[in-house]
Image (cartoon, grey):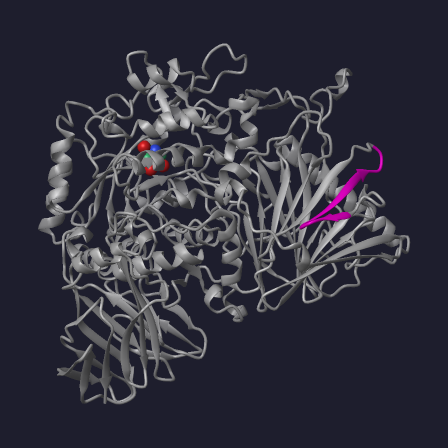
Amino acid sequence: MNLKSPFRTRTTALFYFAATASLCLQGVLAVKKEDFKTCEQAAFCRRHRAFADAIVQASQSTISKGSSSNLAVPSSASPYIITSKSVHLEGHTLVATILHDTDKVPLKLEVIFLADGTVRIRLQEENPLIPRFDETQKHVLRDEGNTLEYASADSIGYSSETAGQSVVHTVCYTKEGNNFAVRLTEFPWSLAYMQDNKVVIEINHNGFFNFEHLRTKPDTSETNGVEGEWEETFRSWTDSKPRGPESFGVDIRFNGYDHVYGIPEHSASLSLKNTRGDKDGYGEPYRLWNLDVFEYELDSPMALYGSIPFMVAHNPNSTVGVFWLNAAETWVDVTREKSSTLSSLFRLSGSSKEQAVNTHWISESGIMDVFLMPGPSVSDLYKQYTALVESTPLPREFALGYHQCRWNYIDQDDVLAVSDKMHEHNIPYDVIWLDIEYTDGKRYFTWDSNNFPDPVAMQKQLSHDGHKLVVVIDPHIKHDSAYYVWKEGNEKEYFIKNKAKTDNYQGWCWPGESNWVDYLDSNAMEWTSGLYHLDKFNGSTTDLFVWNDMNEPSIFNGPEITIERDLKHYGGWEHRDLHNIYGMLYHKATYNGLRTRESPNKRPFVLSRAYFAGSQRYGAIWTGDNAASWDHLHASVRMVLSNNIAGMHFSGADVGGFFGNPEPELLTRWYQLGIWYPFFRAHAHIDTKRREPWVAGEPYLSIMREAILERYRMLPHWYTLFRETSLTGMPIARPMWMEFPKDTGLFAEERAFMVGSSIMVVPSTDPDISKPIDVAFPSKENWYDMHTYTSYFAPTKRQFTIDLAQTLVFVRGGSIIPTRERQRRASALMKYDPFTLYVYVSRDGTATGKLYLDDGETYDYEEGAFIERELLFVDSRLSSRPSAHTVETSAQRIFLEKMKKVRVERVVIVGLRSPLTRATVTEGDVVREIELSCGGSKASSECVVRDPAVLVSNDWEIAFS
Ligand code: NOJ
C-alpha cells in the first residue's frame, strides 16, 4: 500500500482499525460526513425543497383565505397547468402539453398504458434546446424497452368532463378482473392512478412538480452560480454545469398507505422513515448517488454503493410500486399524513381523513420517466416490475454455497492451506477469494508472480476438490504504458476524457494514477468483456470467477470519492446523467466476458459493489464495508431485505463484518445469520486478524461448522427458490409483511424475516445472550422449530432464551423442504447425492413444496434440461409430479439419463396428529411396503421413512396409514 498517496488519510484510518477491538468499534467508526453532500449542498435538491416549501406556504395562505380545496383536490398553488385542448389519446398513450404560468416552455407529457396495468409517465420539453439523456431505458429495461407490452387500444376507454375550474380526462381499462383508471386533471395538473375507483397513487397532488427547462446561459453575472445553476462548488471541486439547470422534481403520493419500502441502498429503517418535519425521522432525503462511503453509519438516508429507484407501498389491501427510471443523482423526501392528525408538513388542507405517504422525487438531469405499478398483490407487483427490468437469472449453483474471502490470502500456498484447513475441519465451502493484492501492482488481469507463480496449477488444485476461485477486478486501470490493458484502452481511446478533452481523465485509486473506461461506448464494453477471455487473461481458467469492486466508481481524490459529474462520455453525455448505471455497465461487461469465454456458454458469477435496477441480471451484490459490530449484524437484515424488495435478490453482507475484529460470539452469530442471506460470503479487512471458522477454536468452530453445514443441507431448497425467483421476480429474502400482508403488526418488522414463503429466521443480534428474543408467529398456521420440530400454534407470541449453539429458525406448516444431507467438501460434489424431503404438516394435515434441479452450470435448462417436481402431501399421501414447466426435449432426456440414479433417501413427516404405522410406495407399476418409524410427543409426532428409494425424476406416491 502506498502511504504517500493522496488517500493516505484513508489508509491511516484503516490501520487504526487493526488495533481496534470490536467492542469499542461502535464508538470509533465514524463516517466523514463532510465528504458527502447534504441536500442543502446539492443546489438542485436545495432548489426543489425550497420550491416545495413555497408551494406549501402559498397553499396554506390560500386555505386560510377560505379556499375550499381539500386533499382530494390537488394544490392550486402549482404554477403548472395542462393546456386546454392539448390532451388526446394516441393508441395506448395519452398525450398532453404542460405549461408553466410564466416561462411558457411547453412540456410534453405522455401517459403510456401497458398491458399489465402498469402506467408509464414520460415528461420533458416538447422541443428541448439540446437533447436530454434518455439512454437509461436502453441499459435498464428488458430488451432495451423495445418489447414492452402495451394495452390494446380497444381495451382502453377515454372520456373527459369539466369539473369545477378544470377539465378532467379519464382513461379506464380492465386487466384480469382489476379495474384501473388514470385521471388527468388540467388545472392544476395532476395525475391520479385509481384502482376500483379509489385513488392509490397520485402524481403532483401537492403541486411540487417543478421542471427546470433547458435554457441558454444568461449574460448577467448575478445569475451565474448564485443558486448553483451554472456552476457549483463543493469543497475544492467545481462542477462547471455547461448545460445549466436541468433538474426536475415531483411529488408522488401513496394514498391510503402508511408504509413504503425499497429505494436501496441505505442503511435506513426497512419501513422508510420520514425525512421532513418529524423529530423521529431523518432530516435529509434518501439520496441515490452511488458512492464509496468509508465507515458508513447505520440508520441513515445517506447514499451508499448502489441505487435502485424502486419504491413499494403496502397496506393490508394492496401493494403498489413506483419505479423512477433515472440514473442521475436523485433525492427522495418521505413524509406521512396520518388519518387522524392535521399537522403533517405537506398537508395542504384538512378535510380528508385518509392516511397517505407523500414522497418527493428530485433528479438532477435526464428525463422524467416513471412507472406506476398497480399490484395489487405482492406477486402481481413483482410480475409487473419483472416485466420491466427482468428478474435474477438462475445463478451457477456453486454461487449459493459458502464463499471464503479476506483481504488478502497472501499467496498460492496460503490459498491452498486455507482450503486444506477447511477440509481438515470438515467445513464445506465452494469458493475462495483473492482481493487486490494478488495482482502485479494492482494491474488487473495480471498476477503477482512471486506470490502466485502458477495460478493455473492453484486453480486446478482447487477444482480437484470441487472449489472455484474468485478474483477481484476493479474498474480503475493503472496508468502505465507498459501495462497491456492500459496500452490497449489508451490506443483505442476507450478511456473517459478530461474536461478539456485534451487527455484521458486521471484519478487516484489503489494502483495510484488510473484511468476509467467509458462504458457508454459499446465498443469499449465489448473490449472489456474480451479481456476476460481465456486466451487474453493469462492465468485464468474456466473455474475462475470475478468480483467487481470500487465501481461506483470510487476515486480517492474525486469529489465525494467519485468522479466529476461534468466529465463527458461517449455521445457527449455528461457523467451526471448516467452515474448511477456506470457500475452496472461495468458489471455487465464482466458478465458478458465470462459468459462468452467458453462455448457452449456457461453461467457466469460476478459480484459487484455498485448497482442499479437491472444489475440483478449480471450477478450478486453485497452491502460493502460494514463493521464487526452487533449493530451492523442487525442492520444487515434490513439492508438485504431492501435489496430484495427492489429486485436485487442475490445479495448479502460481509459475514463477520469488514472492519474490526469480531469477538467469537459475534462471528458465530454472524455465520448463523449469514447462511440465510441469499449471498453467503465471509470477508475481512486486510488489517484484521485471521478469522476463518477454525481460528476461534471450540465451541465456536463446531457451531460455525454446523451453520455452514445447514446452508449446504438446504442448497436444494435455495436453488429451487432461485429458480422460482427467476420466473416470478419475487424476493428470496422477504420482509414478514410480504408473506402476511394483512398483519399490520409486521409492517415495520426488521429482525425476523422469511426465506421464501416457508422459513422464518429470527436472528440473534444482541451481545447479551441472556436477553430473551421475542418471536411473533403469524397467521393461523402451525410453525415448527426447524431443529427440534417443536410446534407453535399461531397466531401467538413467544419469548426464547437460547444459547450460542441454538438458532431460531421456524418452518411454516404446510411446507415441504428438500435437502441433501451427505456431508461434502463443496456443492459440486453433491450433484448426484440423494435427497431428503421434510414434510411440515399444516393445521389441515396437508403440505406442498417444490424441487428444482439442473446441471447447475450451463444454459441447457433453457432447452428443458431440468427436473422440476411438485411435491404434495394430502390425505396422508405424499406424491411427486412434474411441474407445468416440464417439457420433453432431447436436452431433457440427456439430463434425465445423467440423473437416473438420483433418489430420495429419506422422508421426514413432522407434525402428524397421530403416528403412522404403514407406508406403501407406488412408483410406476411397482408397489412396495417400506420401513417407517415414528416418534415424538402425544401432541405431535414425526415419522421417518428410511429409504423409500424413489427416483427423483419419477412420478411416485407414498401412502401412509
Ligand atoms: C473495498 C471493498 O469494499 C472491500 O470489500 C475490499 O476488500 C477492498 N475494497 C479492497 O479491495
Compared to 926, does 140 lie above or below? above
Q: Residue at x 25, y 46 (%)?
A: 403
Q: Quadrant of residue 794?
A: bottom left
Q: Residue at x 55, y 34 (%)?
A: 135
Compared to 234, does 636 lie above or below? below
Please state the extent of the stretch shown in magenta in the rendering.
Answer: 88-102
Residue 17 seen anywhere in this rendered image of the structure: no
Magenta span contains residue 90: yes
Outermost residue, top side:
502
Residue 324 seen anywhere in this rendered image of the structure: yes
Q: Residue at x 59, y 69 (%)?
A: 317
Q: Position of residue 926 (x, y in %)?
A: 15, 80
Q: Residue at x 48, y 52 (%)?
A: 386
The quarter in which the C terminus is drawn is bottom left
The quarter in which the N terminus is drawn is top left
Q: Position of residue 763 (x, y in %)?
A: 35, 61
Q: Position of residue 395 (x, y in %)?
A: 32, 49
Q: Position of residue 298 (x, y in %)?
A: 46, 46
Compared to 951, does 157 lie above or below? above
Magenta span contains residue 481: no
